[in-house]
Image (cartoon, rainbow, N blue to C red):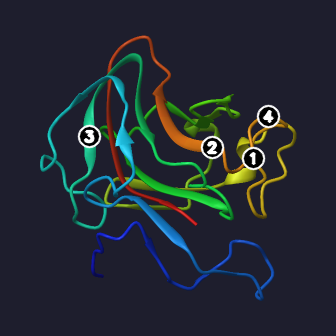
Amino acid sequence: SSSSSSSSSSLSLPSSSTSSSNWITSVTNVLSGALSSGWSDLSWAFNSWGSSTVAGVNGDSAKCGTVEGSGAYKIQGFGGSFQGKQVLDFWVRQNNNVDPDFSVYLSSSINGECRTLNLKSLSYVQIKSGWLEYQIQLNTFDWRSNSGSGTFNGCSSTISDWDVNTIVFQNNWGGSQYFCISDIKIY
C-alpha cells in the first residue's frame, strides 16, 4: 500500500456497524510514519527513541519511547478533527509478548477530558507480528453513555464533537514502561 502525506483521503471503507448501507468516506491519517500536518506532539514524561528506531506495523516508522510513571504520548489536532467520525483505529506494540498497560482518552484543549479507557479492558481486533490493532467506537469516550456505534456526538454537554482535538495514551504504572504506536487513524 502506498503512503500519502495528505491528512485526509477519500477512501471508501465499510462502516463497523451492521448495516451494509453505511459507508465511511473520509479517513484522517493522524500518524503514518510521522504526524500528519496539523497535529502536534504534546507528550509529557515521554522519552522518544527517535523517528527511525522501530518499524511500525506497515513498515513506516513507529512512534516509540520510554514513558515514565503517569507520563503520556499526547497528540493534538484541530477543532473538528473528530466531527462526523465513528472510530479511533491504532496499533500498539507488545513488550516481550505482554500488552502495554496504558489508558487512552480524548480531550478538548479548552473544555476538558472525555471518558478514559484502559487498553487492557478492551479487545484488540487483530495481532500482527507483536502489534495489536484497536478499533474503538468514538462514542465509547462519551460521559453521557457508552452507546458505542454511530457518528461521534462529543463527550458531554460541554464537550462537543467539534471541541475534541486531542488523543492521549497514558502510562497506568507508577514506573516506566516502553510504548510504541503506529498507524493512528480516525474514520
- Asked whether disc 1 touches disc 2, contact meaning CB atoms under 8 Å apart, the reply is yes
Query: Label 2 is placed on what type of residue?
Result: Val
Q: Nearer the viewer, mark 3 or mark 1?
A: 1
First in sequence: mark 1 vs mark 2? 1
Relative to the observer, which residue lies in front, 33 or 90? 33
Give me the C-alpha separation between circle 3 and circle 4: 33 Å
Query: Label 4 is placed on what type of residue?
Result: Thr
Give me the C-alpha separation between circle 1 and circle 4: 9 Å
First in sequence: mark 3 vs mark 2? 3
Q: What is the x, y in percent for residue 39? A: 39, 48
Q: Quadrant of the N terminus?
A: bottom left
**In the rendered view, would you say 165 is above or below 1?**
above
Task: Using the image, tell me which numbered label, if any, was put on residue 64.
Answer: 3
Query: Label 1 is placed on what type of residue?
Result: Gly
**In the rendered view, would you say 181 is above or below 71?**
below
Q: What is the x, y in percent for residue 141? A: 71, 42
Give me the C-alpha separation between circle 1 and circle 2: 7 Å
- Asked whether disc 3 touches disc 4, contact meaning CB atoms under 8 Å apart, the reply is no
Q: Which residue is mark 4?
A: 158
Q: Secondary structure at mark 4?
A: loop
- Asked whether disc 1 touches disc 4, contact meaning CB atoms under 8 Å apart, the reply is no
Q: What is the x, y in percent for residue 130? A: 34, 53
Judge from the rendering whether residue 123 lies leftward or rightward of residue 45; answer left or right. right
Task: Using the image, tell me which numbered label, if any, was put on residue 164.
Answer: 2
Judge from the rendering whether residue 182 lies leftward or rightward of residue 61; answer left or right. right
| Residue at 22% across, 62% down | 60
Judge from the rendering whether residue 187 lies leftward or rightward of residue 70; answer left or right. right
Q: Which residue is mark 1?
A: 154
Local packing at callout 4 (Cα closer than 10 Å; few below 14, some 14-19, many 20+) is few
Q: Nearer the viewer, mark 1 or mark 4?
A: 4
